[in-house]
Amino acid sequence: MLSSVTGIPAGVRGIVAAAAVLAAGAAISLGLFGPTGVARAAPSSASASAAQVADLATGRNLFLQSCASCHGAQGQGGPSGPSIENAGAALADFVLRTGRMPLADPAVPMQRGRPAFDDSQIRALVAYVASLGSGPAIPSVQTTGADLAAGQQLYTANCAACHGAGGAGGTVGRDVAPGLDQADPTTVGEAVVTGPGPMPLFAFSQQQLDSLAAYVVSLRSLPHPGGLQIAEIGPVAEGFLAGFVGIVTLLAVARWTASGSVEEDAATDESHERTT
């Protein structure tokens, strides 16, 4: 029987409608209609979750290979290394990105060096260590527009005694307080919020942290209007060296003057003897 509206048999219209529904479903599943609707958000979330799981799995494998022998399989620590269960992403990123970990010998102090892992491996390790406990996250440090004067005050009051007035380090030993010439803003922030090694933990506001990091970075181009800086340690070392050099110079001049006087006296005596 023919339809009174279209003139197409009803059975044919049913087949066409079913085909249209199937085609629309295929187009939606293939993403031909673009990123519209709520249904399109699900694959993105699923992909992000899958990437996080993959990072954690990769990080765990790397941790078991390179870190667990000292810190334990779950970061609980052991005879050769402390617990890092609550180290957090900040401390893990700090020691891995600056090459301080892993140590070839647990008895050797941490020192800055070349990273043992590439960026993707570091991200995976950081993600795994962060998952072990509730340590601090990697701080977001912004130095653009920061207050350098406030940063200098914070540095002088809290950092200069160990890292030196100019950030050269070594005031209390380079193993304790290294130089800051390679420290980027994120590294400064991570050190402040975690207190690695013998460094104390500081509780600065975000504004203070930004100002301090900006000042530390500015130390790389610190002007020297007064002349040569002695390892950027400060005026005490420079004054001592100046005094030492001055005293030695005076002694040398005095010795030279005295020897010249003795030679003149001897020549005078010899001339007098010949005359008499």
Image: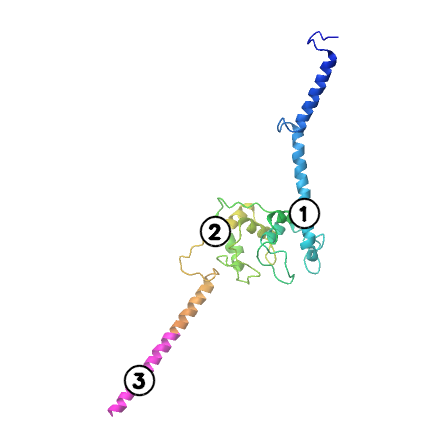
Q: Quadrant of the N terminus?
A: top right
Cα separation between marks 3 and 1: 87 Å
Relative to 263, say whether 47 is above or below.
above
Q: Quadrant of the C terminus?
A: bottom left
Highlighted range, magenta = 251-276
Residue 82 screen position, x and y as percent: 68, 57
Q: Secondary structure at mark 1?
A: helix
Circle 1 Cα neighbour tier, 10 Å, few/some/many (<14 / 14–19 / ≥20): some
Q: Nearer the viewer, residue 120 or 171?
A: 120
Regarding residue 136, the answer to whether it shows in the image is no
Verify whether residue 27 appears in magenta: no
Residue 205 screen position, x and y as percent: 56, 47
Relative to 105, say whether 142 is above or below.
above
Cα separation between marks 2 and 3: 60 Å
Residue pointed to by mark 1? 58
Going 70% across and 23% down the picture, which residue do you hit?
22
Left or right, 173 with reference to 42: left
Going 42% across and 68% down the picture, which residue do you hit?
243
Residue type at the position of mark 3: Asp
Q: Nearer the viewer, residue 64 or 266?
A: 64
Relative to 69, say whether 52 is above or below.
above
Q: Which of disc 1 and disc 2 is earlier in sequence?
A: 1
Tell me whether circle 2 and circle 1 mark residues in contact (CB < 8 Å).
no
Tell me whether circle 2 and circle 3 mark residues in contact (CB < 8 Å).
no
Residue pointed to by mark 3? 265
Residue pointed to by mark 2? 218
Circle 2 Cα neighbour tier, 10 Å, few/some/many (<14 / 14–19 / ≥20): some
Q: Secondary structure at mark 2?
A: helix
